[in-house]
Image (spheres, rainbow, N blue to C red):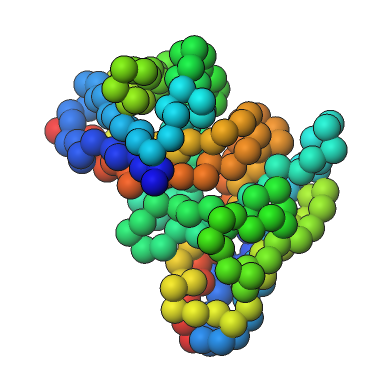
């Protein structure tokens, strides 16, 4: 199975600051069709995960442009600029290139 | 609006089975895959498997073969997951989530069901 390693495990950020989360894959996530099926989620306390970014860099409906995704191959990054209180929670990456689909271990974003 | 409404929390005995549900509304149930995901307390997320309600086709993470059985009822737009031979390792929150295509993200999720296995 593909292992997704997220770093850091936790992140202390001031309101208005910038956060950067890495997701590194044990295998290339480029599918034979040329697409890369790496997605990002935020799970707020007591809630189910919500989709932020799909296929590396596309924001889901209603997601503000403070969230951006980038990367290729095995290395991916989620950046959150101008952090707001509602951004706090655990961030996960998910790969759907190789079956079984797997999630990263999560990165907890907390306020400094 | 898209909603996935899951059934309530379950307290079940070791060795027994449990069936949890996920009722879909706000979209065409038979046009989207329905996935199930496990989250143990303090742990990350594990994909269990998916069902395509349009024809009942299923695919499982090999790890959950024999543990989880996915079904769907088109008449009520409800997906089900049965977990069998329960042990403490099955105590977790279980989410349903939909996706439009084979590799697309899970775009909407249910609120989750807490299953506790205890004697």
Q: Left or right: B115 with respect to B34?
A: left
Closest to the observer, A35 or B54: B54
Asked whether residue B106 is in view, the answer is yes
Please tell me whether residue A23 is drawn above or below residue B74 in the rendered image.
below
Residue A103: x %, y % from top left? 58, 46
Image quadrant of residue B113? top left
Closest to the observer, B91 or A31: A31
Please tell me whether residue A81 is drawn above or below residue B111 in the rendered image.
below
Closest to the observer, A37 or A9: A37
User: Residue at horizontal 35%, vertical 51%?
Assistant: B41
Q: Left or right: B4 with respect to A93?
A: left
Residue B76: x %, y % from top left? 29, 22
Q: Quadrant of the N terminus of chain A?
A: top right
User: Residue at horizontal 59%, vertical 55%?
Assistant: A60
Asked whether residue A1 is in view, the answer is no
User: Residue at horizontal 85%, vertical 38%?
Assistant: A34
Residue B112: x %, y % from top left? 33, 44
All told, the count of numbered labels is 0
Residue B12: x %, y % from top left? 18, 31
Residue placed farthest to the left in the image?
A: B119
User: Residue at horizontal 49%, vertical 12%?
Assistant: B55
Closest to the observer, B114 or A1: B114
Q: Left or right: B88 with respect to B8?
A: right
Please tell me whether residue B63 is drawn above or below residue A30 in the rendered image.
above
């Amino acid at each position: 199975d593909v292992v997704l390693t997220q770093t850091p495990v936790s992140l202390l950020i001031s309101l208005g600051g910038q956060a950067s989360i890495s997701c590194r894959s044990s295998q290339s996530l480029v599918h034979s069709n040329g697409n890369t099926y790496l997605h990002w989620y935020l799970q707020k306390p007591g809630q189910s995960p919500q989709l932020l970014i799909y296929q590396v860099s596309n924001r889901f409906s209603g997601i503000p442009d403070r969230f951006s995704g980038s990367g290729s191959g095995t290395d991916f990054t989620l950046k959150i600029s101008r952090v707001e209180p509602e951004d706090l929670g655990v961030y996960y990456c998910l790969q759907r290139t190789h079956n079984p689909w797997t999630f990263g271990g999560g990165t907890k974003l907390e306020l400094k | 609006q898209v909603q996935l409404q899951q059934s309530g929390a379950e307290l079940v005995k070791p060795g027994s089975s449990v069936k949890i549900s996920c009722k879909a509304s706000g979209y065409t149930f038979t046009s989207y895959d329905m996935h199930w995901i496990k989250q143990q307390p303090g742990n990350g997320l594990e994909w269990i498997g998916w069902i395509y309600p349009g024809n009942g086709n299923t695919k499982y993470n090999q790890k959950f073969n024999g543990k989880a059985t996915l079904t769907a009822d088109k008449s009520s737009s409800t997906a089900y997951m049965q977990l069998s031979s329960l042990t403490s390792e099955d105590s977790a929150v279980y989410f349903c989530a939909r996706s439009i295509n084979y590799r697309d993200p899970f775009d909407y999720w249910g609120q989750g069901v807490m299953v506790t296995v205890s004697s």
